[in-house]
Image (spheres, rainbow, N blue to C red):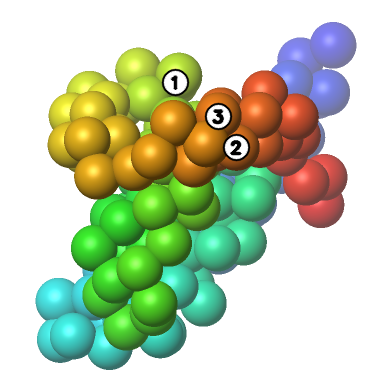
Amino acid sequence: MTRQLILMAALIVGLAVPAWAGFDEGMAAYERGDYETALREWRPLAELGDADAQNNLGVIYSFGLGVAYDYVQGHLWLSLAAAQGQEEARKYRDLVEKKMSSEQIAEAQRLAREWKPKVE
């Protein structure tokens, strides 16, 4: 049993390192204004369910940073992050929602309800 726990812990740590590397690379790209690279680094993490990456994608789409404004995608990612307790995401989502039509809000909420994390 102890050996299994050690192997499980090693596996978890091994998987976390590449994920954080992608997150950190995305943050460095974001800070230098390279939003395309940040988006590319964070998307796989967000699709796996990482709340911080989801929040960051939501910000990129909501504020049109290196991409066309997409309030529906922004709201979707911010909602997913907020559902995991990411307070910053909730605040941004509420701001973005004020710029959206009721149809856009309904679409974003539908997408959030139907969203499932990808499995590696």
Identify residue for label 1: 84
Q: Position of residue 35 (x, y in %)?
A: 32, 81
Query: For the point 39% across and 77% down, which residue is it?
Result: 68
Q: In the rendered structure, which amino acid carries the disc numbered 1?
A: Gln
Q: Residues within 10 Å of mark 2 (few under 14, many from 20)?
A: some
Q: Nearer the viewer, mark 2 or mark 1?
A: 2
Query: Does residue 25 appear left or right of residue 9 in this picture?
Result: left
Query: Does residue 120 appear left or right of residue 37 in this picture?
Result: right
Q: Which mark is residue 106?
A: 3
Q: Residues within 10 Å of mark 1 (few under 14, many from 20)?
A: some
Helix, strand or loop at mark 1 = loop
Q: In the rendered structure, which amino acid carries the disc numbered 2?
A: Glu
Count of marks, rendered view: 3
Camera-nearest residue between 13 and 46:
46
Q: Quadrant of residue 95?
A: top left
Identify residue for label 2: 107
Q: Position of residue 120 (x, y in %)?
A: 81, 52
Q: Position of residue 78 (x, y in %)?
A: 39, 38
Separation of marks 2 and 1 at Cα, in angstroms: 20 Å
Vertical placement of residue 36 versus 82, above or below: below
Camera-nearest residue between 1 and 107:
107
Camera-nearest residue between 69 and 2:
69
Helix, strand or loop at mark 3 = helix
